[in-house]
Amino acid sequence: MSEFLDILTHGRRFKAAVKELSVEDLKDVAVKLEKIITEKEKQAEEESAVMAERNAKIEEIRQQMEAVGLSIDDLGAVAAKPAPKKRAPRPPKYKIEVNGETITWTGQGRTPTVFKNELDKGRSLDEFLIKA
């Protein structure tokens, strides 16, 4: 939560934050807050109506399916195929030890800095190859 919301939702902190405002300014803030509250309530009512309409359509379709003898399981054969499985991570192809820490790299993507530094010093990438 932002600091503004912390102050706005905490009674004493809010009172301290607005103590220098005039009564006119406070009334103006109250009017603005009331407008926001009214808009939020209207939005919540609209969302509730949309959900009620959606649920009514779902119930209508469920009743139609029941009337013709279909079940949800029957639709499973027509449903879209599931997303492909995530592949297993690639095994490391290169390994280097720096300050007692072992760094590995698959050989794909950006070259890690420790490998790049060693290559710049004239070493070959084959020197870091993990032998199977």
Image (tube, helix red, strand yellow):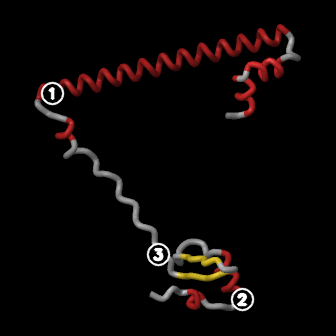
In the depicted structure, whether residue 51 falls above or below residue 124: above
* Label 3 element class: loop
Kind of residue sitting beneath label 1? Glu
Figure label count: 3
Q: Is 91 positioned to the left or the right of 29 in the image?
A: left
Judging from the image, what secondary structure is the residue with disc 2 in?
loop
Identity of the residue drawn at 58% across and 91% down: 127
Residues marked 3 and 1 touching at CB (< 8 Å): no
Residue at image coords 57%, 87% = 128
Counting from the top left corner in percent of width and height, residue 20 is at 88, 17
Say what amino acid the circle numbered 2 marks. Lys
Which quadrant would the N terminus be assigned to in this image?
top right
Rendered image: mark on residue 121:
2
Residue beneath the point at 70% across and 28% down: 5
The residue pinned by badge 1 equals 66
- The residues bearing labels 3 and 1 have C-alpha atoms spaced at a distance of 52 Å
- The residue at which mark 3 appears reads as 91
What residue appears at the point 56 percent right and 77 percent down from the top-left corner? 104
N-term mark: 3 or 1: 1
Q: Is residue 76 above or below residue 35?
A: below
Which label sits in the foreground, 3 or 2?
3
Q: In the image shown, does 90 or 80 lie closer to the viewer?
A: 90
Residue 69 pos. (x, y %) = 11, 31
Q: Is residue 98 left or right of 94 when viewed as pictured?
A: right
